[in-house]
Image (spheres, coloured by chain):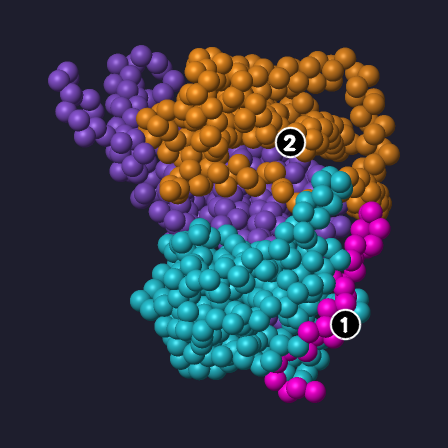
Amino acid sequence: MNDTGIQITDVGVRFPSPKGTVTAVENVTQHIPGGSFVSIVGPSGCGKSTLLAVIAGLQKPTSGGVRVHGREVTGPDRHIGFVFQEDSTLPWRNVEENVRFAMQMGGTPRAEQQRRAQEAIDLVGLSGFEHSYPSMLSGGMRQRVALARTLALEPNVVLMDEPFAALDQQTRIFLGAEVRQIWSRTHQTVVFVTHDIGEAILLSQQVWVMSYRPGTIIDVIDVDLPEQRDASIVSTHEFNELHNRIWTSLQAESMRGFQQEEMSA
Amino acid sequence: MSASASAPRLRLDPRQPAVSVAGTTLVVLALGLLLELGGRAEWWDVIPPLSAMFQGVAGLVGDAQFWSDAYRTGLEVAVSLVFGSVFGLLAGITFWKLPAVGRAFEPYLVALYAVPLALFYPFMIVLVGINVWSVILLATAMAAIPMALNTAVGLASMRPVYTKLGRSLNLSPRQMLFAVALPAAGPYLVAGLRMALVYSLIGCVAMEFVTAQAGLGYRIRYLYEIFDDTGMYAYILVVLLISVALTVLLGLVERLILRGRISW
Amino acid sequence: MVSTSSLTIARSRISPLPKIALTRNTVGPVVLAAAVLLLWQISSGLVFVIPSPAATVQELFANLADPQYRTDLAVTAGATVRAFVVGAGIGFVLGLLVGFSDWAKALLEPLLVAFNGLPKIVLYPILLQMFSLGGGKVAMGILFALFPVFVNVATGVRELPPVYWKLALSTRASRWQRLVHIVLPGIRKPLLTGIRLSVSLAMSGVVLSEFFATDRGLGRVVLQAFSHAEYATMVATLVLLIVTSFVISVALWNLEKKIR
């Protein structure tokens, strides 16, 4: 048994629905070494967010289980950070208070809160904005606040559920690069869910491809690109090969997804 | 900005607050002038000239009776506001936490929102007598209703991501309520409070108007019945001024509390 | 960009219409009503002045059989209807005006917001002197009924998605067409809310005026019953008023909920 990292064992999630049981996730067994960056791509509705929720302890699996850092996941945990897709900044608190929020709720002493908050704010590149309110910030900046809040807790694991989906293309690329940078400094274990293949390849060391419902991992691709990457890497041969390989797997699943949705509509 | 060859158009932007305030002040002054001139020229014998009314108001300042009445009304409003908003807040929170209870009360709250419970006043007097308490009890109920409705709506409108955030951080129900839900509902709570104050004021004065022992509403009625027109108008004007002042004050307080949340 | 004053008005529009997702559940309200009735029955046994529900209903029927009472009822009802129609009508026109014209909004809105916060009933003596007993209460009812429709229509027009206006432009709709085919359907929800509130407020304005001074009307009946210690009649009439207002409000509210 590995003490660091995430061990997912035979996880399955089934929901009752008016049309019968829906299997969102089925038979997922994977191991993520501590400190690595893994992305999960898949068609919309395939269950990747559900799988992430199981790892986070926000969703109870109907079968199987997850161990994080050797401990079984039974519910939400402050050592497992989660960044949501929607803007989760609290509008009545300024940036600094937002970043301190999680620590405050957890009972961290005030001085410690302020120190760690400042560190996190600097880390995500929001220095100078400590007293601004979210209403004055762009979508991308607000997601950075959410990230800072998560990082300030110094979690072992950071889970991100399509964090940039609501942002425009330019911001996505920019923030993606920043996340990669931050990870290369903190080396936390990161699981990143996205539907953007390019983003997955650019950011991670390993990409899992998930099938449409019932969601299971149909391919695991190691990203053999240099550690130091920047946006120019998208034009390299290696990048395109990876992209094609993932897209081929994904394409069939996406079509299946479309057809299923149309039939049930 | 293009310069036109024909007559230059007014460049004032009506959407700017300064323009609005200035314009409204002008309108008010114009109406005031009309009232003044009309009164003096005796175009109508019902309303005295504005200056006479203001003189009356000025006279009230030194009048102990006025202050006693104002105190009475003020007391009724203050007590009913405090209790009404607290009950309303608690009720709203209950409706949010226990949706079944909320559904049971909802039609009544919605229907009673527009019916001034002041109609029950005669009955309240029978039960409790003609005193502060009959007014306060009803005014409390009148203030509680908009507060309860607004609280419930505000809490229900909370963005789902906040609930998810709370769960991911393992917040206790208390933390969830005080650190997330109530602040999230902030604008609604403040609006509810404003409405509670307005309804309380309107209710108290209306009830005193019907029958009471003292208070500004009562005094207006009394002066009407003894045909003291000047006195009556002075009191009416005072009540108008007080409510306008309160509305403006509340607007400012609301802005202050919600600073940062509204994007300018 | 949102200015505080329109935000203020927007808030007073939002509040009467709870967005609580409801299942069609009449069980709760009915249970609550039953509980209230039970409480009423119990307290009528304990406190002398409170008539029992049964006695109240009996008295109500006795009253309705009395032609004098029916005249009072007709007077109040007639005044309410007139006040509502005129008040809502004026409110509607003013609402459109403030909704469409930035200048009208700049000049009128603060005045009307201030006016909304005052105990309008204190103006009744003035209205009495101007319009005499019959007209005075209608005038008062008009003032009460005007505001909900005004506020809701004004906010409704201003909150119409900008794309509607672009649609009007691109289809080159005339002013009238814009009003009838785009604006009115677009604001039907807030308009209905405003109408619902307006009906109740019209009645309240009229009855409160009758409490103060009038020749005929249910308000007068209530006060007279009060002074003669005829509590059954008093309560019966109050219940009649409240229940009527309640039934109309709930009916309109259910209609609102169906509109999507």
In the rendered structure, the colour chosen for chain A is cyan
Q: In percent of the image, x 68 and y 33: which residue is there?
A: C257
Relative image position of residue B220 (x, y in whole percent) = 46, 32
Q: Which residue is at 63% across, 52% downward?
A: A251
What is the secondary structure assignment of the residue under circle 2?
A: loop
Looking at the rendered image, the quarter that the N terminus of chain B falls into is top left
| C11 and B234: which is toward the camera | C11
Whether residue C233 sits left or right of residue C189 in the image: it is: right
Amino acid type at mark 2: Arg
Residue at image location 42% in from the left, 34% down from the top: C113
Q: Can residue C48 be seen in this view?
A: no
- Which shade of the palette goes to chain C? orange
Q: Do tag 2 and tag 1 residues touch (Cβ < 8 Å)?
A: no
Report the front residue among C157 and C144. C157
> Against C94, is B197 above or below?
below
Majority SS type along the magenta span: strand
User: Which chain did the renderer colour purple?
Assistant: B
Question: Where does the magenta region start and end?
Answer: A1-30
Residue type, mark 1 in image: Asp
Q: Which of B9 and A168 is in front in this view?
A: A168
Q: Which chain carries label 1?
A: A
Residue at the spot 59% in from the left edge and 60% down from the top edge = A245
Residue at image mark 2: C260
The subunit letter for the residue under badge 2 reads C
Residue assigned mark 1: A10
Is residue B131 magenta-colored? no
Q: Nearer the viewer, mark 2 or mark 1?
A: 1
- State the image quarter where residue B19 is shown: top left
Q: Residues within 10 Å of mark 2 (few under 14, many from 20)?
A: few
